[in-house]
Image: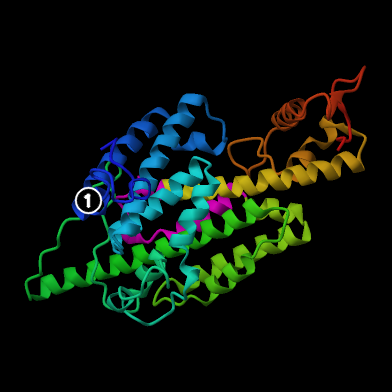
Amino acid sequence: MEWISSVSRSSGLEDGGDVLKDAKVQDEYRTFIESKLQRYWSQYPTGSHLSGDSGDSQRNLQSNILILFRKLREGLMASKRVDDFALEVYETSLYVSVLFRAPAQTTSIVNQLNPHRRGIHDTRTLSESRDTTPAQDSSLTALAGLSLKGSPSLTFPRRGSQHYHPPQPEQAPHPSSASTARSTLRQERHKSALWSTVMSTALISFFHILAHSYPLQPPYHHTLRCFRQSQFDEGEEARDEIFKWLKSIAAAVASRNYVRLQILTRSEEVDGVCHRLHPLEEHGIESHLEMRRLALRCLVENLRTKVRETVWQVLTVSYRELDTTASADWLLRSLMINPGPGEGESQAPSVVCQSAERWLERRGEQETRRKEGSKNRWLLCRRRV
């Protein structure tokens, strides 16, 4: 499995160059990647990726997993496979690329998963969308989203808390009242899973564009407009709440209202949005939902990091000195730095002061240094350009 040629490199000329176009091989290859991914998570827990610090061995493992996912996506695209398996591969690839901080791959995947390349409020069925060529539209999430208005003929792949299992062929239900109820329940779960996928992809796309393009004003207004106009039979209230949250964040960034941005992007706010995206029917796939939540938090933190540098430049121009005893709490809030485990919770003054001093020390002597004869006063130096 490790040495299977990618479709783009072999162009079908090498031995086995087209093997990843085969659906059975794709299922086996996905299982192989999952085993690699699980071993990686056992070495490096998902929560550790929020800091962005990783060694050479960790980066090598990340690069290998990203290459495997890319080869599988190439096989899916070359075979023109558009089903729930392909959607799951792209969705998981998206989360992994964000957590592994590979923005180039995130951009590539978003272009395939982005539901706004065509309105997902289209009323055509999934079967009709299969006739659309990739040149016209290759948005997998858009194709999946269409089935929300049509008859859901696909079964969303089950992603267990530990291992991925390829989708199994579904047996035709016996025409009884019990089987009809089970079929209806499956369809509702399928709709909820697709709704959650479409909304999650839109959120990640929004924050990826916003953070990657900062301080330029990216074309996220189109993403917001399409996000607001997307229509579903369910989840309208949650969608509207998320839309207001995104619009407020975009306005805070545009107006440089950093205090407002700090409040809107607290970890508690992000977790609350993720909770609205998780239908009750998705219980049992906690690891996948955790990956989705951490990917969103990672992008939000990327945005905060870039905005933090802008705020710091403003502070160094406006102030010559800082007293961490009196202004540590104000400094951390302005820089969107969390001194403790709960961002919305109040912390002890000593904890806040120590956190502020650690951050000032990391800036280096070219930007900050302690004032002679004073323990808690710091001199701020303007950065030379």
Report the amino acid beneath label 1: Pro
Point 35% across, 46% down: residue? 71
At horizontal 49% and vertical 54% (from top left) the residue drawn is 108
Dot 1: few (<14), some (14–19), or many (≥20) neighbours within 10 Å? some
Q: Position of residue 157 (x, y in %)?
A: 26, 56
Q: Quadrant of residue 68?
A: top left
Q: Is residue 320 magenta?
A: no
Vertically, is 201 above or below 66? Answer: below
Q: Is residue 331 or residue 222 the one in the foreground?
A: 222
Give the main secondary structure, helix, strand or loop, of the magenta stretch: helix
Q: Magenta stretch?
A: 266-290
Question: What colouring does the structure picture have?
Answer: rainbow
* Outermost residue, bottom side: 123
**Which residue matches tag 1?**
166
Residue 186 picture quarter: bottom left
Taking the image as shown, residue 182 lies to the left or right of residue 269, namely left
Q: Is residue 356 above or below residue 253?
A: above
| Position of residue 177 measured from the top left corner of the image (x, y, whole percent) | 11, 76
